[in-house]
Image (cartoon, rainbow, N blue to C red):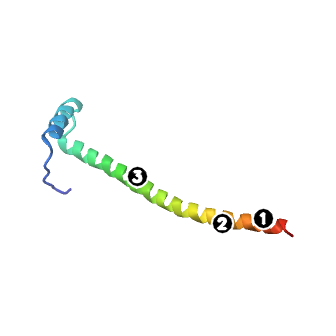
Amino acid sequence: MKNISLKIDEKVFSDTERILSKIKKSRNRYINDAISFYNRYQNRRLLEQKLKAESELVKNDSMRILKEFENIDYADETI
């Protein structure tokens, strides 16, 4: 385990202490769980951004290919 020094806003600290007294969880475990949860959230956001970017690339290629197929269909009708 790594040790870190952390500065927390007074309101966040007060809210955390209030919650901790009710759920009977150590501050260390609570903060670890919170960071782990937030990391998963951020990883999902990063994946979403990556998928949107890749989807945009695929969309552009798909539209280009669709136009090529349309041109082939029209070329067949003129024969």
Quadrant (top left, top right, bottom left, bottom right) of the C terminus: bottom right
Camera-nearest residue between 18 and 67? 67
Which residue is drawn at the image coordinates 39% and 56% (left, top)? Answer: 46
SS under mark 3: helix
Q: Which residue is mark 1?
A: 73
Please tell me whether mark 2 sits on a helix, a strand or a loop: helix
Q: Secondary structure at mark 1?
A: helix
Q: Which mark is residue 44?
A: 3
Closer to the eye: label 3 or 1? 1
Please name whichever residue, 53 or 3, is drawn nearer the observer in this view of the structure: 53
Relative depth, front residue between 10 and 21: 10
At label 1, which amino acid type do we have? Answer: Asp
Closer to the camera: disc 3 or disc 2?
Answer: 2
In primary-sequence order, the first of circles 3 and 2 is 3
Q: What is the distance, in whole Å, between disc 1 and disc 2 at their CAs? A: 12 Å
The spot of residue 19 in percent (x, y) is: 21, 33
Sequence order check, earlier mark of 3 and 1: 3
Q: Quadrant of the N terminus?
A: bottom left
Type of amino acid at the residue the image marks with label 2: Ile
Cα–Cα gap, marks 3 and 1 = 42 Å
In this picture, is 49 found above or below 27? below
**What residue is pinned by disc 2?**
65
